[in-house]
């Protein structure tokens, strides 16, 4: 277990020193969201209507930006070989990488999302629902993304293929995530949607690391 | 303790590279893997480290297959690949410290001292020269107590002084009952080493 946390800590240190991953996905997220009012016009009712969807789609896309580096950097410098022959099971290596990815690339988006939501004039209840839904749903993005990242590791221009592989699998998260926010805005119970979202996350927690570990072994040999 | 390879065949991208390779390694013995470029030296070492599945044949440590009993083999060997596994944003000592902790060793001061890395300990690995990177990579050996060393091009980019230092370290490891299997293009001038030429088993 100590090794598991050390690996997470190393990835967090690397992210903090290089800083590019955090600022990249965060600024991409902000820019995409800010483009929408410019595109569809400043009408508040329209923005409030499309806001939750815009924020969710922007979060999915920003997550993709950093996903292809999840294993790539370790693969290129030989670290992955040494991680794999070490005592930590491959599934746990994947899980550690997923946690580090979520903390560095997705958590900053969730922190800034309420501000963007208010600027799209989503009502207060909706903002709360959006933050909760993002917290419950986004681990799936990293977990499913890990499988795609492991499969496309070592490919040139693997990022494009990765998007095609992973984005369709994000659809359930998008549907339930937006439904939860819409329900909260309409003053309907949002718990069923959040429970479904949590269910998807737990399912991905079981399947993701195992599938990604298998894909990693395949990519290395 | 015995490391043995039985009737090994290696296939890369549908092409058989070598087959019928057998050898065994006991305490205090070393094998120098030779062969032209593409003869499968790195692949053989990766198979020995359990990173690559052989096309046919088996690899055994203490008479147990390393792929089915990988838990028992895991702490017994140390692999140094031709990539350096160093993170440019971390310092030399942070890099060594991470790997030492990950593989369960603690002796990083000896590791730094052995390859004269103490003056570089707080230097980010990103600005090291090739030779310095190699030394940092090799220093992980000193932090490890594994009996079997698997080394892919351990002395490339090293100058004469450090090649001699590495040789001395390797001889001490062998004298202490260790084993080593390594691939280099240079002759290290070690007497008790056995040569294994992959061109002889090439397909």
Image (tube, coloured by chain):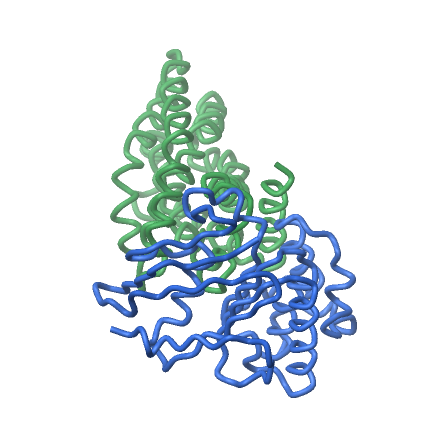
Q: Which chain is blue?
A: B
Q: Locate residue A164, reporting x and y percent.
A: 25, 48
Q: Locate residue A104, reporting x and y percent.
A: 54, 46
Q: Is residue A108 left or right of residue A221?
A: right
Residue A140, above or below A77? above
At x 31%, y 63%, the residue is B10
Residue B149 visible? The answer is yes
Residue A172, above or below A10? above
Which residue is at the front of the view, A190 or B31?
B31
Asked where in the image residue B89 lies, by quadrant, the reply is bottom right
At x 43%, y 62%, the residue is B46
Q: Is residue B54 left or right of residue A113?
A: left
Image colour for chain A is green
Residue A174, above or below A193? below
Which residue is at the front of the view, B169 or B190?
B190
Residue A108 visible? The answer is no
At x 39%, y 37%, the residue is A210
Q: Is residue B31 left or right of residue B111?
A: left
């Amino acid at each position: 277990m100590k090794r598991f946390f050390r690996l997470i800590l190393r990835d967090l240190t690397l992210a903090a020193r290089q800083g590019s991953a955090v600022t990249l996905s965060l600024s991409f997220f902000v820019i995409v969201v800010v483009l929408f009012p410019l595109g569809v016009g400043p009408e508040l009712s329209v923005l409030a209507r499309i806001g939750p969807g815009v924020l969710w789609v922007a979060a999915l896309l920003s997550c993709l930006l950093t996903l292809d580096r999840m294993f790539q950097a370790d693969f290129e410098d030989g670290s992955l070989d040494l991680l794999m022959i070490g005592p930590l099971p491959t599934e746990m290596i994947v899980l550690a990488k997923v946690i580090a990815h979520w903390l560095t690339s997705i958590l900053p988006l969730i922190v800034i999302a309420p501000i963007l939501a208010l600027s799209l004039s989503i009502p207060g209840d909706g903002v709360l629902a959006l933050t909760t839904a993002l917290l419950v749903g986004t681990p799936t993005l990293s977990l499913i993304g890990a499988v795609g990242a492991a499969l496309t590791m070592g490919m040139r221009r693997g990022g494009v293929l990765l998007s095609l592989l992973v984005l369709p699998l994000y659809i359930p998260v998008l549907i339930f995530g937006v439904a939860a926010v819409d329900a909260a805005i309409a003053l309907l119970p949002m718990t069923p949607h959040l429970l479904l979202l949590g269910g998807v996350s737990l399912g991905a927690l079981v399947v993701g690391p195992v599938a990604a570990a298998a894909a990693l072994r395949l990519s290395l040999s | 303790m015995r490391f043995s390879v039985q009737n090994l065949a290696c296939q890369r991208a549908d092409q058989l590279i070598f087959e019928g390779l057998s050898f065994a390694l006991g305490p205090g013995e070393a094998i120098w893997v030779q062969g032209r470029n593409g003869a499968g030296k790195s692949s053989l070492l990766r198979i020995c480290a359990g990173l690559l599945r052989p096309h046919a044949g088996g690899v055994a440590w203490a008479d147990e297959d390393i792929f089915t009993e990988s838990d028992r083999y895991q702490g017994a060997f140390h692999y140094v690949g031709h990539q350096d596994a160093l993170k440019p944003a971390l310092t030399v000592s942070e890099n060594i410290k991470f790997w030492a902790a990950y593989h369960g060793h603690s002796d990083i001061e000896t590791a730094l001292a052995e390859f004269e890395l103490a003056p570089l300990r707080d230097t980010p690995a990103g600005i090291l020269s090739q030779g310095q990177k190699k030394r940092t990579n090799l220093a992980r050996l000193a932090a490890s107590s594994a009996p079997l060393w698997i080394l892919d091009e351990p002395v490339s980019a090293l100058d004469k002084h450090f090649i001699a230092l590495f040789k001395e370290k390797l001889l001490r490891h062998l004298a202490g009952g260790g084993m080593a299997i390594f691939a280099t293009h240079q002759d290290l001038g070690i007497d008790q080493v056995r040569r294994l030429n992959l061109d002889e088993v090439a397909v």
